Every structure is written in C-alpha cells, then in structure tokens.
Image (spheres, helix red, strand yellow):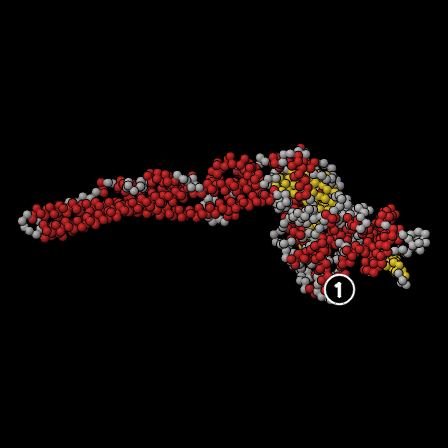
C-alpha cells in the first residue's frame, strides 16, 4: 500500500482532499554543518520516495563549509557553500567588533582559507555565514525556497502556515558557529512573510554518540563547543543580552536579537534517553532516529479537514516557566522505540535456516551408495573380479569369431620342393609373419572397437554424475564418484593380476615355440624317417604358435580393458577434483551460514532484551527461542518441498557451482528468492497484534511491557534525576500500519500510554509499530552530560584566556565575543554561596530592620544588606562605615560574589540572627512576609521592556532559586 493509498483509506475521497489536509503542510528543512546537511539530504531522498507527487511541498537547504559534491541530491539552489575559498581574516576585517580579537588570535593561528570545514572552530563557522557574498547567497536561496512553498501553500486550506526546521549539532565548528545567526535571520525572515505564528522548530544534537570513536583530544573540543553553544543559546532564550547585529542586507540592518525570533520548541537530542540508556551507538543511528521522527509528521494523516495542529506542531508551554533552581524550562526532546515482530531480522534468520538445511542436504552422503555403485558397474559391464565383464564386452563388441587365431604352419612351410636346411629359418619367418598379421587383423579391431566403448563409458560416468547433481546433491554425486573410483581400482587390480599371468603364459609359450623350432632342427638331422619327423615337428610348432597367438589376443583384450579402466579412473578423479572445489566451497558456505545464524540469533536476543535492544532503540517481542517455535510452526512442515525448490533454483542460477563469488556476494544473490518465495508469504500471516497477543496474553504482562516501553521511548535527553521537574508535557505519536492502527485502538493499547495526547502516523509494515514520545519543559542544566561539557569548556576557555593575556595564538571557544561575559549554565558552588548570603541579606533587611526604623523601607534601616535608590550597601564594623556594594542589582551582585570578606560579614550576621530567632520563625516569616515581595519584584521586572529590568528579573529568579536551595538543604523546608 502506498502512502497515497493509505491517505485515501482514511476516508479521503480524492486527491484534492489529500492536498487539503495538514499531513502535506509545506515544510522547509535547513541543515547546518556536516550532520545537518546529511539529515537534509536523507530527508529529501526519503520524501521523494514517500510522496513523489508532492515533493514541491517541501524545501531543503543545506549549509556547510565544504564544497557542494558533484553528485548531490540537493540542487544548486538548495545548498549554500559557506565562504568556500575565503580567508576568515578577510571576513573579520569587515566586522569591526572582531578587530583585535579574531584577527589577532585566530589569524595568527595559521587558519587557512575555508575549503574543507571549519575544523571545529565555531568562530570560523560564524564568520563564514557573516561573509557578505555568502549572506546574500543564503538570503537569495531562502527566498526561492519560501516562494516555492508559498506557491504550493495556496493549494492548502486557508490560513495553514508553512513550517521551518533548523537541524544542527551543538559541537561542530560550522553548524554551532553560525547556529544563532541562522536562527535569528530565519525567524525574522519568516515572521515578516508568514506571520508570527508560523511553526518554527530547531533540533540540536549533542556529540555524546561520538564518544569512543573520535580521538580524545577531538572530543574535548566537541564538548567545549557544546557547552559554549548551549551557553549562548540559553542566554538568548532566557534573558535579553540587549544585542543588535548589523547583517549585510538592508532588511537585517540593526537587527535586534530578541528571543521571540527564535524557534519554539527547541529540541535537544543526544545518544542516551532520559534514564541514561544508550539508544544510538553511532552518529548514523542518531541521524536515522531524527529522520524517522521528521518523516512521522508527513506520515501522520489528519482525519479532520480543518488541519488542527498535530503534536509535532506543539509549542513548549513551559517555555517561560521557571523550573528547578528557577532555571527556565525552555528545552524539549523526543524519543523513539520501534517495537514488534522484526520481520526483516526474522525473515533473514528463517532464510538462513532454510539455506542451512538446503546446504546440509546438498552435502549429505547416501548410506546405500555401495549398492548403487555395484548396480552401475553391473549395468555397464565393468566388473572384472571373478566375472571378466569388461573383457566380454570388448570381445562381444569386436566379434568373438574375429578374435580367434588359426595357424596352418604345415601348409605354408612344407610346400612341394621345400628344403630341409631352410625349415628352421622358415619357421621363424612364419612366426614373425603371423605375429605381424595378428596385429593388423586382431589388435587393430580391438583398438577400434575399444575406443567407442571407452568413450561411451566415460560419458556414462559424466552423465551419471550430472544426473546425481541434478536429482540428488553435490555430496551424493561426489561420494558416488569416490566409491566408483574405489570399485574400479579393485576391478582393475584383478585385471592387472590377469594381465601379469597372461604375460607369464606368453613368455612360457614363446619358450615352447623356441623348443619346438629346435625340434624341427633336430628332426632334419638324420635321413632315416626324416620326412615323418619333420612333419611331426612342424605340427608341434603349429600348435604352440597358435596357442601363443590366441594368448596374445587375450592379452590385448585385457590391456584394452585396463586402458578403459585407467581412463574411467582418470575421469572420476578429474570430475571429483573439479567438484571438490565446489564441495569445499559449499562446506565453507554452510559454515558461514551457520555463523550468520548464530549472529542473527544473538542480535534477536539482544533486541528482545529490554536492557540492550537493537540499533535505533528497536525492541523485539520475539527472542531466538520464540523465533524457533515460529519456524517450526510456519516453515518446517513445508521444509522438504522447499529444499527441492531452492535446490532447483540454485542449479538454474548457478549458485551451487559458484566458486568465484565470496560469501557476501553469494549470499546476496542466493538468498532473496528464498526470502521472497518461501519465507515472506509465511511471515505475512503475522502482524504486530497477533504476535503481541500470542506472547503477552494477560493484562499484567501487557501493562509491564508498555511500562517498559515508556522508558525505552523516553526522550533522548539524559536527565539528571536530582534536577527532574515534577511534571512535563508528554505526547505520543504511534506510527502503525492501517490494519494495526485499528488493532491498537480495538485492543485498547492506548490506555497503557499516559500523556496529554496521541496521534497516529503511517508505517508501511504491519509487523511493528513505532512509538515516538515528545516531552516539553526541560531545563538545560538538568541535562546530565552538561558537567562533562563544562569541564572541557573551562579547561579550553582558561587556555584561551591565558593565550589572550599573553598575546599567543589560541582559538576562541565562543563565536560571540560578548558570550565570554555571560553567565555560566551551571553556577559554581562559590557563586551559589554568594547568592545565598546576598538574598538572605536582602530578606533579613526587610524582616529584621535596624531598631528605631519605623519601616523596612525607612532610611534609618541599615540592617544586613540595604539599598538607597539603585545603590546597594553593607555596614562594615569599625570605622569603615557603609560600604557601597554596587550601583544596580547586577553590578552589586557581581561585586558581592567577588568579595569574600563581604560574604563572610553577611554570613556571620545572618547565622547569628538565625541562632537568635530560631529556624522555625525564620522559615515562617520568610514564607509569609518576604516571598510575596520577591515574586512581585520578579513580575514587575519581567513586564518592563527595559533590557536592564529584564536582566534584573533574571538575577532575581536566580536569587530566589538560591533561597529555595538554602531552605531545602539547610532549613529542611520541602517547599517554599
């Protein structure tokens, strides 16, 4: 079913209605740096396949300090090469605020022209974006994307805004360096075009997934960059640094950087989920998760034509709220778990098991092969031991009458007029003539008839072997040859014994002929009875010569039989050795397949282990044991027939005799047909609901597995349990096949997923569902990896400051000059201590004024820490009198944090007062009399548009957080 088919299945009657639903809202994806561009390229490819008829409803923009690849799915107007070939020093010269900072430090660090990335230098990434020509190129391509989406947008319901995503890492030099500039400029651009309410989101990725892959020194830079980026982002999101930036375009001259221009929500994504479980092991897996989440939005059909926002469009309702330690809850995140019956892995496993069984059958040896060989030898007249079948075959083929030698020595030697003194010579001459004639008349026919017999038998060996290969197996065919070879050797050995005996007889007969010729010579010596004696001697010669010649014929027959045996043995050996390579290859294939089965079973068991799971946080309802049961149920009943079909296909395609391909090549060629023809039709009988109900029958087990799934799908935000908020906004996206959506609803699985809302997205497989959980309201300092980032940041930042002081070339960590003076994300313990005594000094001034002062606000009240107008003072003992702490809250608070003697003075007075009055009264009076005043100050400052007042509100929130910490940790008050 295609995506369009699915939309139509949701009561969508026609294409026009498809285009009016929010599922196809126009979206712009902007990717910064290498990772961001990778995600955007992958998204374009996936979306083209998903909704090919609506690709114009999506725009893509990649930005990186690398040249555009020659083969790139992103078009020329979809990629912004950031200042390729430009010297960053040249850009710095056009930015007055960088003079004496960037050029002095980075310039002298031998930074080359931008060609292959920013090399982790965030300031290079920012300057690459700020370059005049690059900035204009970016605006031009952004305008083209906006125009394209606006054309497409006209086909939608009225008032539907376009949506913008910005995707980047927090660690890379390019992406994190230009991140804030891009966010502000894009925010300003689309607020003017689309209005203030256009959905605008950012997805920022931490570098933790690279730990263990990237070199240690490189990770130090990545972590430091991450902290610096978060510090910059957090400052703009939570306070107003009162910055105005001049960009090189009239529309962006004197752009005031306000948080209203920034995305909401701001998703923070890492390698671990909330509980600290590793979800992504490689950067590619993290990219897969992001792409899967972004595609879920397109795959979430809206059954309501009014196009109400989906959960992916939700803004962070906690954005301006104070959380733990009064830190703004400005961040959000999402998590994903894919659960069900992993048909790809189990399909692979079942395919491998069928291949294993087929290979085992191919290598199996026939236990009755000896009988088969005996029958074959008998049918081809090749038994010699005790039977002389092959000799009889040669005799019969040649003609038995032709193979009889007859001798007429008397008639040829004792012709009229013979002379006695010539008889011996004539006997010898006659023997030679008969032997020569025998070769022509007897041996030649044996050779002529023996050749076709040999050819026929050799062909029979090949034909029998081929038939066994085709009808039986390689193992049986080769075993047949092996046993046939052994049998032929036995029969040949018997024949050789006969040949040896035959030759011995020939030698004996030759001697007898020589004796008989000697008898002729003796017979002619005396004249008395000479004629009779000579006649008898010639007759004896004749008989012995005839026996010799017939024995010679028998020897030739035997030698021809031996030659045939030799040729047959050679044929058997050659075919066997030729196919021994095939046999050994198949044995190797079998071993490799068995290794793959072990690996797939281990992968399945890991995927079914709630603590381990598969890549991308994939969880299987089926482990290897359960999969084995399903194999026995679904595949084994038809296994024998399947082996025959597979074998026939392998023979046809040459997979059995393929010895050239390596195992991976062979597997990729030999397995798809098995999967498609034998396995998939059987697995198609299963789906998520049927497997779930099979293995999780009772309500208790269902509750337990869904409880686990809540943790597995928890957002990719590694949460510090000590800084966890009491509640978050949580939403679910369930990507399911249409058939499984109804099962999900009918079986009331939704009841197991607590949250503010659930929507359904399309997933093309009925065997699994994907659960996405969106959660809003995190504070940045509740991210557990922040301490590691801070440690590396502090180390490199200190190195930078030392280099700056000594005018040595050291790369800055920040890309914003002003950021060096901004507050840290995690206040130091010393700063927290200073904040505690500072706020207690203010509170105690109100609660315990100087005796004689009619009210806390009276000028006579100089108790603890007091103010006169905007000035803050501290009374110092002795002749020193009042000490000016600072003018304005911000200055006073900073100065107080730098003076340990002031802190100790105020600490001593506060502790004395607590001891004097008692903790209980202190608690009660602060709760009843002071907190309302403090909250009122915060609200008043927040509402004032003056940047200094907004900064004052931020400081007051931090001071309140310090007061809460003091109550919780030292006065043991659970809640203020």
Residue for badge 1: 100
Q: Visible in this render: residue 444?
A: no
In the image, taking residue 550 as reference, residue 906 lies left or right, namely right
Helix, strand, or loop for circle 1?
A: loop
Q: Quick one: quadrant of the N terminus?
A: top right
Residue 214 image position (x, y, % from top left): 63, 55
Residue 512 image position (x, y, % from top left): 17, 49
Q: Visible in this render: residue 953?
A: yes
* Figure quadrant of residue 223: bottom right
In the image, taking residue 333 as reference, residue 609 lies left or right, namely left
- Which residue is depicted at the point 68% across and 58% down? 221
- Which residue is depicted at the point 91% across and 52% down? 856
Label 1: how many Cα within 10 Å (few below 14, some 14–19, many 20+): few
In the image, taking residue 785 as reference, residue 952 lies left or right, namely right
Residue 320 image position (x, y, % from top left): 79, 47
Number of marks present in the image shown: 1
820 and 956: which is toward the camera:
956
Residue 774 image position (x, y, % from top left): 71, 43
609 and 344: which is toward the camera:
609
* Figure quadrant of residue 864: bottom right
- Which residue is depicted at the point 38% across and 45% down? 482
175 and 871: which is toward the camera:
871
436 and 885: which is toward the camera:
885
């Amino acid at each position: 079913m295609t995506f369009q088919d699915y939309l139509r299945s949701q009561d969508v009657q026609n294409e026009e209605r498809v285009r009016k639903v929010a599922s196809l809202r126009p979206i712009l994806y902007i990717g910064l740096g290498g990772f961001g561009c990778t995600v955007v390229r992958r998204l374009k490819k996936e979306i083209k396949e998903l909704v090919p008829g609506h690709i114009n409803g999506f725009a893509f923009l990649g930005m990186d300090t690398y040249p555009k690849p020659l083969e790139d799915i992103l078009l020329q107007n979809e990629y912004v090469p950031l200042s390729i070939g430009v010297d960053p020093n040249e850009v710095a010269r056009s930015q007055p605020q960088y003079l004496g900072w960037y050029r002095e430090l980075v310039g002298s660090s031998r930074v080359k022209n931008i060609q292959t990335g920013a090399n982790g230098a965030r300031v290079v990434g920012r300057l690459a974006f700020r370059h005049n020509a690059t900035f204009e190129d970016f605006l031009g391509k952004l305008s083209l994307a906006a125009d394209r989406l606006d054309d497409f947008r006209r086909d939608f319901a009225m008032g539907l805004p376009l949506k913008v995503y910005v995707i980047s890492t927090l660690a890379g030099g390019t992406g994190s360096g230009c991140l804030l500039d891009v966010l502000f400029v894009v925010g300003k651009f689309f607020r003017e075009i689309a209005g203030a309410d256009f959905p605008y989101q950012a997805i920022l990725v931490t570098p933790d997934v690279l730990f263990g892959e990237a070199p240690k020194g490189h990770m130090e830079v990545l972590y430091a960059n991450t902290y610096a980026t978060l510090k910059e982002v957090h400052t703009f999101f939570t306070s107003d640094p009162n910055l105005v930036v001049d960009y090189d375009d009239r529309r962006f001259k004197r752009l005031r950087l306000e948080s209203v221009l920034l995305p909401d929500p701001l998703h923070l994504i890492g390698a671990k989920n909330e509980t600290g479980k590793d979800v992504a092991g490689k950067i590619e897996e993290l990219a897969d998760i992001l792409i899967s989440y972004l595609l879920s939005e397109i795959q979430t059909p809206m059954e309501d034509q009014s196009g109400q926002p989906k959960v992916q469009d939700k803004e962070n309702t906690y954005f301006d709220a104070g959380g733990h330690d009064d830190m703004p809850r400005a961040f959000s995140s999402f998590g994903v778990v894919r659960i069900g019956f992993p048909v790809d892995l189990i399909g692979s496993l079942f395919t491998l098991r069928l291949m294993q069984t087929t290979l085992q059958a191919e290598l199996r040896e026939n236990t009755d092969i000896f009988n088969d060989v005996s029958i074959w030898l008998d049918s081809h007249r090749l038994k010699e031991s005790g039977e002389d079948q092959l000799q009889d075959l040669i005799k019969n083929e040649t003609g038995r009458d032709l193979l009889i030698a007859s001798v007429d020595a008397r008639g040829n030697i004792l012709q009229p007029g013979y002379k006695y003194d010539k008889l011996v010579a004539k006997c010898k001459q006659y023997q030679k003539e008969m032997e020569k004639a025998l070769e022509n008349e007897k041996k030649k026919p044996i050779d002529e008839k023996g050749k076709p017999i040999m050819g026929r038998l050799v062909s029979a060996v090949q034909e029998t072997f081929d038939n066994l290969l085709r009808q039986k197996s390689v193992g049986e065919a080769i075993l047949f040859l092996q046993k046939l070879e052994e049998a032929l050797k036995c029969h040949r050995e018997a024949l050789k014994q006969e040949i040896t005996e035959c030759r011995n007889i020939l030698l004996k007969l030759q001697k007898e002929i020589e004796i008989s010729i000697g008898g002729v010579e003796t017979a002619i010596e005396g004249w008395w009875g000479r004629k009779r004696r000579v006649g008898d001697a010639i007759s004896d010669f004749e008989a012995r010569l005839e026996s010799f010649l017939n024995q010679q014929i028998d020897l030739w027959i035997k030698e021809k039989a031996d030659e045939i045996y030799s040729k047959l043995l050679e044929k058997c050996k050659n075919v066997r050795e030729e196919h021994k390579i095939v046999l050994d290859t198949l044995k190797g294939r079998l071993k490799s397949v068995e290794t793959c089965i072990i690996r797939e079973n281990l992968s399945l068991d890991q995927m079914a282990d709630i603590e381990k799971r598969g890549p991308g946080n994939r969880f299987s309802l089926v482990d290897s044991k359960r999969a084995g049961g399903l194999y026995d149920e679904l595949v084994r009943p038809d296994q024998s027939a399947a082996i025959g079909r597979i074998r026939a296909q392998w023979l046809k395609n040459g997979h059995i005799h393929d010895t050239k391909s390596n195992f991976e090549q062979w597997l990729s060629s030999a397995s798809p047909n098995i999967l498609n023809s034998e396995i998939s039709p059987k697995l198609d009988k299963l789906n998520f609901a049927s497997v779930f109900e099979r293995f999780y029958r009772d309500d208790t087990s269902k509750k337990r597995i869904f409880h686990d799934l809540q943790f597995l799908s928890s957002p990719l935000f590694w949460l510090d349990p000590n800084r966890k908020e009491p509640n978050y906004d949580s939403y679910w996206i369930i990507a399911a096949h249409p058939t499984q959506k109804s099962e999900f609803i009918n079986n009331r699985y939704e009841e197991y997923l607590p949250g503010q809302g659930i929507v359904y997205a399309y997933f093309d497989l009925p065997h699994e569902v994907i659960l996405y959980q969106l959660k809003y309201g995190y504070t940045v300092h509740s991210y557990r990896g922040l301490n590691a980032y801070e440690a590396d940041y502090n180390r490199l930042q200190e190195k930078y400051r030392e280099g700056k002081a000594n005018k040595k070339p050291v790369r800055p960590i920040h890309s914003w000059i002003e950021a060096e003076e901004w507050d840290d994300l995690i206040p130091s313990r010393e700063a927290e201590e200073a904040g505690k005594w500072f706020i207690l000094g203010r509170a105690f001034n109100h609660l315990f004024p100087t005796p004689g002062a009619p009210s806390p606000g009276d000028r006579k009240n100089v108790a603890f820490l007091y103010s006169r107008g905007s000035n803050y003072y501290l009374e110092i003992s002795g002749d020193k009198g009042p000490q000016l702490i600072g003018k304005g809250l911000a200055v006073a608070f900073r100065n107080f944090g730098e003076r340990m003697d002031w802190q100790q003075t105020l600490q001593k007075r506060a502790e004395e007062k607590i001891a004097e009055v008692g903790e209980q009264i202190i608690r009660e009076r602060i709760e009843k009399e002071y907190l309302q005043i403090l909250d009122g100050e915060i609200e008043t400052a927040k509402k004032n548009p003056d940047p200094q007042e907004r900064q004052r509100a931020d400081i007051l929130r931090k001071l309140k957080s310090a007061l809460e910490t003091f109550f919780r940790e030292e006065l043991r008050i659970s809640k203020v």
